[in-house]
Each structure stands twice: as C-alpha cells, then as structure tokens.
Image (cartoon, rainbow, N blue to C red):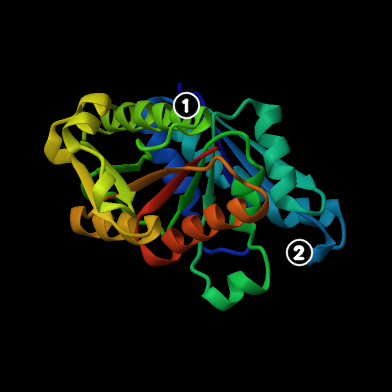
Amino acid sequence: MALDKILVIIDPTADQQPAFERGLDSARDTGALLHLYLCVDEQAGYASLEGAQEQLQPLLDGLSNRAQQEGFEAASELEWAPDWPKRAVSAGARCGASMIFKNSFDHSSVQRELRETSDWTLLRMASCPVLMVKNFHDWKHRRVLAAINPASTEAAHIKLDQQIISLAQQLAGAYQSDAHFVTAFQDLNHAPRADHIARDCGVPEEQVHLQKGKAADVIRDVAANLDVDLIIVGTVARDGIKGRVVGNTCERLLDQTHSDLLVLN
C-alpha cells in the first residue's frame, strides 16, 4: 500500500497537535502529501461557519505553512457539519487519503462503556487505515509491532494478515527499523510455529513473538518489552458483538500502551 496522502484531523480544543507532528514526520520519511482537516458546528461552541473560520483558519494556515516551509505540500479544509467522525471519513475518501491520522487521548473503562468514543467511531467507519497518535513524542527506535492471526482459515482474516505483513515491512523499511510480529493464542496444543510465521513474514525467528493469552494483553506486554513506537492491528468485524470485541481490544491498547496504534480494516 502506497502512503501517498495523509488526512490529518486537527483538534481545535488542543494546544498541541500530535497527529500533525506525526504526519509531518511521515511526510519526511515517505514524501506523502498532507491534507489537514477540521470539522466543527454549533455543538463545538461556534455560532456560525464564518465565526469558526475567523477563529480556526489561522490555526490551519499556520500548520500548512509550517509543512510547506519544510518542502511538503499541505492542503487544509474547514468543514461546518455535525458528527465530525463521519464527516472526516467522507473527507478522507474525497481527497483520496491512504491513511487518516488522529490524536488519541486516554479514557477510563467507565467512559468507554457509557458511550462510544470518537476513536472507535472513526475506526469503525473508516475505509482506510487509521493511525491513533498518542501524546506526541519522538519515536525512539521507530520499531514496528504487527499483530497477526495465522491460525485463522477465514479468507477475510488471511487477506488482512497479508495486508498487515506487507504494511509492517513497508513502514519498517521507510523508517529504517525492524518489523516484529506478535500472535496471541489460547490452546497450548495448537500453538502456532514461530519458524513458519517468520518464513511467511520474511523476518528472523527472533522477531516473532508467541504468547498464550488475550490479544490485547499479549500485544500490550510484547509492545512494552520491545519498547515499540508503533503497533499495527487489523479489524474484520466492525459491527455487532464481534465488532464490539474488536473495539474493546483497540481501545484497551490505546489506553494501556504508550505506542501509536495503526488500525487496518
């Protein structure tokens, strides 16, 4: 998958813009174009589009100018509409984004149970990969950890694993770093073989990590042990009970790790 254009969601309530900083880093590494997107309405405290433009256009212009000064193309868009996660997904499709970057902030388990967060709404609706960026810090190792499910025989899971492996290798190459792969399993009698996974992923066996346990716990622990900067996970089911389980896994990783989380659909 070519990383040609990144839709960066700008948060008008935040003093810092971690998603923009990560987008600018990615542009340096890959040459991707940036599309800065901001969506508000009266629910965000603005009386009109004109009032929002007066207050927020300088923010967008300042970020665009900063990217352009470094030699990267950065368009900007300010939209007046409700339900900004849905509008951001539409904006990504409209501008041809190959990825969406968004700031992510920790939520308590109670907050996530009481209502669907904007994080999960965006992950559930997006047709392209979404990078959830934690509070901005420079990546120390640029190390990538990708979660795969090699035991599955379902065509959708097999295809998704292939996409995850390809993207992990692509990003590790762009970042001049290593791609590691993690698999959680439940049955000790049917544990996957690390040498087979290493062969399929094109990495040394020591870069494959197998652990018994729940997916979120295993991924979290391996990510902490390796001190990775980026975790890649995939989602197949995004609705119903299976979708909620996938959402819980993604949201637990967001709240329990310091790594950025890239979600493929």
Residue under the point 81% across and 65% down: 43
| Residue 265, above or below 50 | above
Residue most toward the right? 48
**Residue, disc 1:** 159
Tell me the quarter of the picture where residue 198 sits.
Answer: top left
- Number of numbered discs present? 2
- Can you tell which of label 1 and label 2 is closer to the viewer? 1
Earlier-in-chain disc, 1 versus 2: 2
Residue under the point 84% across and 51% down: 49
The picture places residue 94, in percent across and down from the top left corner, at 71, 28
Q: Residues within 10 Å of mark 1 (few under 14, many from 20)?
A: few
The picture places residue 165, in percent across and down from the top left corner, at 35, 30
Give the SS element for disc 2.
helix
**Residue, disc 2:** 44
| Residue 191, above or below 115 | above
Residue under the point 16% across and 32% down: 195
The residue closer to the viewer here, 100 or 164, is 164
The residue closer to the viewer here, 134 or 244, is 244
The answer to whether residue 149 is left or right of residue 204 is: right
Tell me the quarter of the picture where residue 76 sits.
Answer: top right
Q: Is residue 55 visible?
A: yes
Residue type of the residue flagged with mark 2: Ala
The answer to whether residue 168 is left or right of residue 53 is: left
Give the SS element for disc 1.
helix
